[in-house]
């Protein structure tokens, strides 16, 4: 992800090297899904983590999943006319 931002910061002439932007967003969505599974498992398996913190992070991950999936739909899905 940071390599994408580095290349993007180099300027418009490097935009041709950012063809993988769509895939980076998809990979981030997979990362959030794995984080959600991990957080739910810590709740189910009754791990010794603070419950309030686990619930907080679960909400944060769900919000990020929503925001990234909304961005993905708007940026990369073809519009039906």
Image: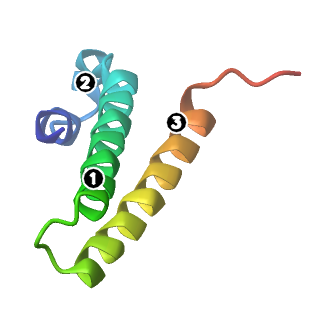
Task: Tell me the tag on residue 13.
Answer: 2
Point out residue 29 in the picture as x, y percentages from the top left corner: 38, 38
Residue drawn at point x = 62 percent, y = 38 percent: 74
Above-or-below relation of 66 to 12 = below
Which element type, helix, strand or loop, lies under badge 2? helix
Above-or-below relation of 64 to 54 = above
Check the picture and name the quadrant holding the N terminus: top left
Q: Which mark is first along the chain, 1 or 3?
A: 1
Q: Which mark is first along the chain, 1 or 2?
A: 2
Point out residue 23 in the picture as x, y percentages from the top left corner: 35, 22
Which element type, helix, strand or loop, lies under badge 1? helix
What distance separates the C-alpha of mark 2 from that of mark 3?
24 Å
Which element type, helix, strand or loop, lies under badge 3? helix
Q: Along the line of sight, which residue is nearer the eye, 2 or 44? A: 44
Residue receiving disc 1 = 41
What distance separates the C-alpha of mark 2 from that of mark 1?
45 Å
Above-or-below relation of 37 to 74 = below
Q: Rate crowding at label 2 as few (under 14), some (14 to 19) or many (20 or more) other CA atoms within 10 Å.
A: few
Point out residue 81 in the picture as x, y percentages from the top left corner: 89, 21
Discs 2/1, front? 1
Q: Are marks 2 and 1 in contact (CB under 8 Å)?
A: no
Task: Tell me the tag on residue 72.
Answer: 3
In the image, is 28 to the left or to the right of 14? Answer: right
Point out residue 20 in the picture as x, y percentages from the top left corner: 30, 19
Discs 2/3, front? 3
Q: Which mark is first along the chain, 3 or 2?
A: 2
Q: Rate crowding at label 1 as few (under 14), some (14 to 19) or many (20 or more) other CA atoms within 10 Å.
A: few
């Amino acid at each position: 992800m940071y390599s994408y931002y580095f290349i993007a910061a180099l300027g418009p002439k490097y935009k041709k090297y950012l063809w993988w932007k769509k895939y980076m967003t998809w990979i981030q969505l997979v990362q959030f899904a794995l984080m959600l599974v991990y957080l739910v498992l810590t709740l189910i398996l009754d791990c010794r983590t603070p419950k309030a913190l686990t619930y907080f992070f679960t909400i944060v991950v769900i919000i990020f999943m929503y925001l990234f999936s909304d961005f993905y739909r708007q940026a990369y899905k073809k519009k039906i006319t």
